[in-house]
Image (cartoon, rainbow, N blue to C red):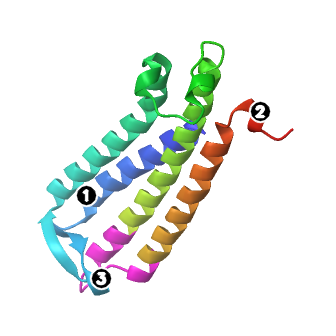
Amino acid sequence: MRAAFIVSFLANLILSLTSLAVLPDRVAMHFGLGGAPDGWASSSTCTLMLLGTHAFVFCSLYFSPKFLAVAPSKWISLPNRDYWLSSQQRSRAVEMFSHYMWQFGAAIFLFMFFVGLLTLRANLSDPVRLDEGALLTAVVIFFAYTAYWLVALLRAFRAPALRRP
């Protein structure tokens, strides 16, 4: 899962830099109802904001398991914390948490990549207009996946007595 997370992050970086190369100097970076642009910026400003956002999300999700490995237990909110953060289980918890963070990170970057493609396409069209139907579909899919992921995470961190054989 780590590889998918890293590849999806790199794909977003490439898309951002490609957008900088092909878009005009002034681009729509926010859209209102109906897909009409209502916020504009220079393409370099937009690219820098995207690169910063991608880097922040990547670092947050990539390094959060490392924080789990070294932080005092009282700073961590995790289901069945006493069990999973015990000295016998902490390394397993970090391994499981890493998997879930990288899995969710790949989903976030996939969503961001799709939105980036929609934004690129909108800015290359005349008139500039975002495909709201495609965006809404992506948002619904992403929220459904997020709900699934959260349930899976909570189930994974149940205490062993609560797990099914």
- Residue 110 at x, y percent in the picture: 49, 56
CA–CA distance between discs 3 and 1?
A: 23 Å
Question: Which stretch did the figure color magenta?
Answer: 118-134
| Lower position in the chain sequence, tag 3 or tag 2 | 3
Marks 3 and 2 sit apart, C-alpha to C-alpha, by 51 Å
Q: Look at the numbered disc 2 and give the secondary structure of its residue.
A: helix
Is label 1 in a helix, a strand or a loop? helix
What's the amino acid at mark 2? Ala
Q: Is residue 114 above or below residue 1?
A: below
Asked whether residue 158 is drawn in magenta, I would say no
133 on left or right of 55: right
User: Which label is found at residue 161?
Assistant: 2
Name above or below for residue 88 compared with residue 8. Answer: above
Q: Quadrant of the N terminus?
A: top right
The stretch drawn in magenta includes residue 129: yes
For disc 3, the marked residue is 35
